[in-house]
Image (cartoon, helix red, strand yellow):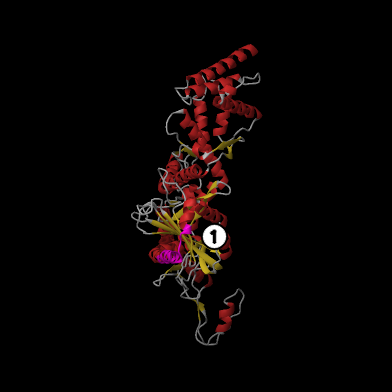
Amino acid sequence: MSKNNKTFHEQTTKQPDRDKVTANFTQEFADDVVKSVKADFAERQKMRRPYELNWQLNMNFTMGNQYCGISPRGSIEQEDKYYFWQEKQVFNHIATIVETRLSRLNRVRPKPVARPFSGSESDVNSAKLSTKILNSARDKIHLDEVIGRATVWSETCGTAFYKISWNPDAEEATVSVCSPFEIYPDSNVTATLDDCESVIHAKVYSSSVVKDTWGVEIQGETVKVFAIDGAQSVGGLGYNSIVPSIVQEAKNDQVLVIERYTKPCSAFPHGKLEIVAGNQLLYYGELPYKIGDGDTFAYPFVRQISLEQAGCFWGSSMVERVIPIQRAYNAVKNRKHEFLNRLAMGVLTVEDGSVDTDNLEEEGLSPGKILVYRQGSVKPQLMDSGDVPADFTYEEEQLLKEFISVSGVSEFARNSTTPNGVNSGVALQLIAEQDDIRMAGSVDSVKHCIKRIAQCILRLYKQFVSVPKLTRYTDGQNSAEVFYFTGSDVGSDDIVFETENELSDSLATRRTMLFELLNAGVLSDSEGKLSANSKAKVLTLMGFGNWENAQDITRLHTARAERENVDIDHAEVLPVDDHDLHVEEHTRFVISGDIDEADKSYRAKVLQHIEQHKKMKKENA
């Protein structure tokens, strides 16, 4: 975490113009900025306080601490038992609902592809290069894992954020996760992040990290932080919340660093960034990154939500909707168990002074016990507690149904069991599709974030890579490529996805579709045969990759033909070439439109190369 912020600070201070602005600081000006930022931060804390309490409550219920609530004092407090014998067990259905939603959302990882600006050869090649850069960056920053961590926050609290920055030492873009506790918009009723006039990012670091990063020694203090998956977020500052330790802890020697981002305006055409820690101004200057549309400066954040709330900056979580149902379910189950305990253990009535009540209370009515009672008194007897009312069972069943209707997660998705009376495959498919429909909003938010992150990554490379950079690209099928590029080569940041519905586009459905196409003969040639090249592609689409040596050779021939398409002047026809594969790949290149219509000479060279393959094949026949 510290490395990302160190490189971010280095980037913001290495720019000459920003150095000039920073050098002109006066102590009075710096004190005014610090005072303004800290006052603004305190005001935003108060405005965001109700949302923060709901997030804390959601986290507690998800983690199983379900006997707490928001008190009138504005804090999360534990609920005590009314009686010592009272059952207060937790029957956590919220956790299974969240886990099911996370497992389905973690399948939403569409591959971003750069779309060419036009059909010209230069734009097509630039888009292909941008796609390779994206694939390489995804692997380096482990984007899938980052999205998974952010999705945990968004599903629990309703909102999560990504922070995109540039590492000048490694010359790489970096993406980190920011919890909702770290972000403070200027208004909680703005619809989007871009609608905010300014945004504050507040995060705690140890005093040693602050000294190493900004070169300033600041006295640390005890700060409360929240933690999920190792991410630490500041929360509850200035309030004496009685928060369960399951979600919050106090850390010593910590420094709160406040970064206030102001979007471009007439007064600040490139925006403004102010960084404050303690009573010191660490940085004052323009926004560091041109990641907005049209090569403009913009916030380095991307917002992900679980459920949209009209007229609200913060998203809603499914946990909020099912908390009342979870409270009622816990109450019903515990009252039912208390009733069963009375039936099983009984309630003994005795006449005053007839028995040794201390012994009876300690040992109970154990089997074989000799119970001595005073002569002439009424002998002890068990009170008739009746049977467990049927209303308990009915209410329990109704609450289970409400979990499904409110959360949108069916028994089929959560328990891997079919509903009673449903045996049709079509019906089960409809149930699965309904689950997907209920999660469409969350899926769209994840896909939007992936697209936006991909655009920001390309724009960062375009802004900062001024000299040729060596990058390695792998296609996931045991094939790797090393290439050089500069920022000027990134000519397209128009991002689209290879697939549109990742929830239904699983490996099993893909294989089923391919088998149906093969049986229908759609993939076969005019003679009803499947070419070697088509076999290799079918195996790749089915997820097997190049799993046979014969297919390895086929893929090598295809890759060699693709390289020849790019550099036909140095292409050479070899006796060991698979001429049919080469002719097929070169022909596809000619008719696909990858060659500029104006470059007739290049097309003629490719056609001549095809004739050489045909001639050598005839000679070797």
| Helix, strand or loop under label 1 | helix
Image quadrant in which the N terminus is located: bottom right
Taking 436 as reference, is 394 above or below it?
below
> In this rendering, would 263 be left or right of 222?
left
Can residue 621 be seen at all in this image of the molecule? no
Q: Quadrant of residue 54?
A: bottom left
Residue 16 in the image, given as x and y percentages of width and height: 49, 51
Q: From the viewer's side, name the closer residue of 551 and 586.
A: 586
Most common SS among magenta residues: helix
Question: What amino acid type is highlighted by mark number 1?
Answer: Trp
Depth check, front residue: 484 or 350? 484
**Residue at label 1?**
214
Left or right side of 271 for 250: right
Which region shows up in magenta? 22-39
Where does residue 612 sit, x and y in percent of width and height?
59, 15
Tell me, yes or no, whether the highlighted magenta stretch contains residue 75. no
Say whether residue 293 is visible.
yes
Where 359 sits versus 164, above or below?
below
Q: Nearer the viewer, residue 300 or 51?
A: 300
Residue at x-position 61% and y-position 77%:
369
Q: Position of residue 38 (x, y in %)?
A: 43, 66
